[in-house]
Image (spheres, rainbow, N blue to C red):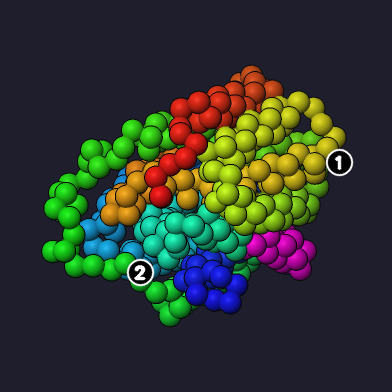
Amino acid sequence: MTKTGFPRNIFALGAVSLLTDVSREMIFPILPIFLRSVLGAGTAFIGLVEGVAESAASILNLLSGWLSDRMRRRKTLMIWGYGLSALTRPLIALATSGWHILVVRFVEKIGKGIRVPPRDALIAASCTVENRGRGFGLHRTMDNIGSIMGPLLAFSLLSFLRNDYRAFFWLAALPAFLAIFVLLFLVQEKGEVNLSDAPRTFRQPFNFRQFDRPFLLFLAISVLFELANSSNAFLLLRVKEVGLPTELIPIIYLFCNIFKAASSLPGGMLSDILGRRNLLALGWLVYGGCYLLFGFPFSLPQAWFIFALYGLFSGMTEGIKKALVADLVTEEARGSAYGIHSFLTNLTQLPASLILGILWQKWGVFVAFSCGALFALSAGVLLLTSIPSRTRA
């Protein structure tokens, strides 16, 4: 435990996510522009790339979470996951067609699928019940600080490299490899036990019977929300369409991430006091409102306001959602719970991105974003009416 009251492991895990996100967020805001302007991809194909990328991790989320419960060695799986993602980052610079990006993003997200459930279970194991929201909030804050640094570095490097995308992608891979070093030497395993000591039910194949009804309801509502949670690439294409210069695309993404970072820790702390369900539902309702605004005509000054609001409530809910999963299940089943939650939500992001991309291409931006807003608003209402305000510790 540090002098700030946070476990040391949370800071180490946060540093891994920070460095990984520096690399990711350097690349992400530029990738849809690269796909469209250099490789000639359309919005429907961009939706396919982003949807497949997010859904690729789905089955591995399920397997990795269950396996981490059996092994109780969360860190080992994390090393494999972060390592695979880092190795694929430089390959973006070598792409000569949209299909190359599709394959690289697919493999990169396999790494994410391996690492996320054991990482979240390790965060939960590193916290107490009373500071679980704060712990996840701090981790998301550090992750989002990486999301701030990434676009800022992207803006600086692109200006220096005079929009040489391929040289830029090579340099953007470096922080991901530094994250592996931090993971290897600073992150500690928690709650490790021998398989022979584990409860008998957790030596059996994965099944839903270990989960109570509130968690299963939360899974269903989360899937509904994720139908609205299409790739942020569409938000960047939207403001580019409105007239934002290409060199400012990383900056508006940076601006959004500043608000995400600023709201992550306060949101987690408030959830420890006021309850996670209420704050998560509020965040989803505001998310739906932001999506609706993206569908209407807006000016460039209004675009900055919408991105700020979107970032504020997105950041507030990220850690709360993770902490709520831990609240709804037993400690022995957390890896499996995070695995099934990630499996379903990531799987849903393929149809979410495809739906928005196809609707935008065939019927226009208003229909596309209004559909997403409807999913998010419905999920927020259902969360308030279906999940108890106080859950198990």
| Residue type of the residue flagged with mark 2 | Lys
| Residue type of the residue flagged with mark 1 | Pro
Looking at the image, is mark 1 or mark 2 nearer the viewer? 2
Magenta residues? 144-163
* Residue highlighted by disc 1: 301
Give yes or no for residue 93 being in the magenta stretch.
Answer: no
- Position of 369 compared to 391: left or right? right
Secondary structure under the numbered disc 1 in the rendered image = helix
Viewer-nearest residue: 157 or 15: 15
Q: Position of residue 231 (x, y in %)?
A: 57, 41
Residue at the spot x=27%, y=63% of the render? 72
Residue at the spot x=46%, y=45% of the render? 324
Q: Position of residue 59 (x, y in %)?
A: 32, 45
Residue at the spot x=45%, y=63% of the render? 127
What label sits on residue 393 in the rendered view?
none
Give yes or no for residue 162 being in the magenta stretch.
Answer: yes
Badge 1 vs badge 2, beta-carbon distance below 8 Å: no
* Residue highlighted by disc 2: 190
How far apart are the alpha carbons under marks 1 and 2? 47 Å
- Position of 317 compared to 245: left or right? left
Q: Please identify the dominant SS of the magenta region.
A: helix
Viewer-nearest residue: 267 or 128: 128
Viewer-nearest residue: 15 or 216: 216
- Position of 118 compared to 176: left or right? left
Res 46 seen here: no
* Label 1, residues with CA under 10 Å away: few <14, some 14-19, many ≥20: few
Q: Please tell me how many numbered marks the rendered image carries.
A: 2
Quick one: label 1 or label 2, which is nearer the N terminus?
A: 2
Secondary structure under the numbered disc 2 in the rendered image = loop
Residue at the spot x=63%, y=31% of the render? 285
Q: Position of residue 271 (x, y in %)?
A: 57, 48
Q: Position of residue 120 (x, y in %)?
A: 42, 57
